[in-house]
Image: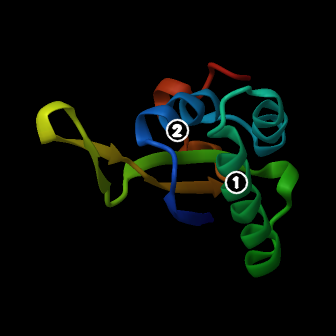
Amino acid sequence: MEVRAIARKIGIPPRKVRLVTEAVKGRKVNEAMAMLRFIPNAAAKPVRAVLASAIANAENNYALDSNDLYVVHIVADPAPTMRRFRVQSRRGMSRINKRASHITVVVSDEYDLIPKALRGKFA
């Protein structure tokens, strides 16, 4: 059974969040949570929170055991960008893009749902 959790408008650019999500994709959730605790990137904290939410959804809504769950799919998509302006020389303006991301985590108790490229890699 696939269970998912989504965090929207996280104030970290998707490119930086993807560095963290690629490290935990395809792993068991206990191992992924332990890794996220010690990854020094700022994006590890919101990714860990979304993963914890997905685990809680699986336990509470579908009565799945958290020891049997795998991170099947985890993705960071771009959210709407805030645009700010800064004054430049000779009364000019330059735009500052403050990018944000949506983080989606899908966990499952079925090993077959993990992409084939990641199956034997972390066993």
Choose between 82 and 24: the one closer to the eye: 82
Residue placed furthest toward the bottom: 61
Kindly check if marks 1 and 2 are in contact, taking CB atoms under 8 A apart as contact. no
Choose between 45 and 54: the one closer to the eye: 45
Q: Is residue 11 left or right of residue 53?
A: left
Q: How many marks?
A: 2
Q: Is residue 72 left or right of residue 57?
A: left
Q: Is residue 98 above or below residue 44?
A: below
Quadrant in which the C terminus appears = top right
Q: Is residue 58 left or right of residue 75?
A: right
Of marks 1 and 2, the one in the foreground = 2
Q: Which residue is mark 1?
A: 51
- Residue 112 lies in what quarter of the image? top right
* Residue drawn at x 77%, y 57% as measured from the top left: 52
Residue 86 visible, this orientation: yes
Quadrant in which the N terminus appears = bottom right
Residues packed near mark 1 inside 10 Å, few (<14), some (14 to 19) or many (20 plus): many
Residues packed near mark 2 inside 10 Å, few (<14), some (14 to 19) or many (20 plus): many
Check disc 2 and report its element: helix, strand or loop.
Answer: helix
Q: Which residue is mark 2?
A: 17
Q: Identify the amino acid type marked 2.
A: Val
In three-dimensional space, the C-alpha distance between marks 1 and 2, rounded to whole angstroms, equals 13 Å
* Residue drawn at x 70%, y 54% as measured from the top left: 51
Choose between 74 and 46: the one closer to the eye: 46
Q: Position of residue 15 (x, y in %)?
A: 42, 34
Dot placed on the residue nearer the N-terminal end, 1 or 2:
2
Q: Is residue 11 above or below residue 19?
A: below
* Residue drawn at x 43%, y 42% as measured from the top left: 14
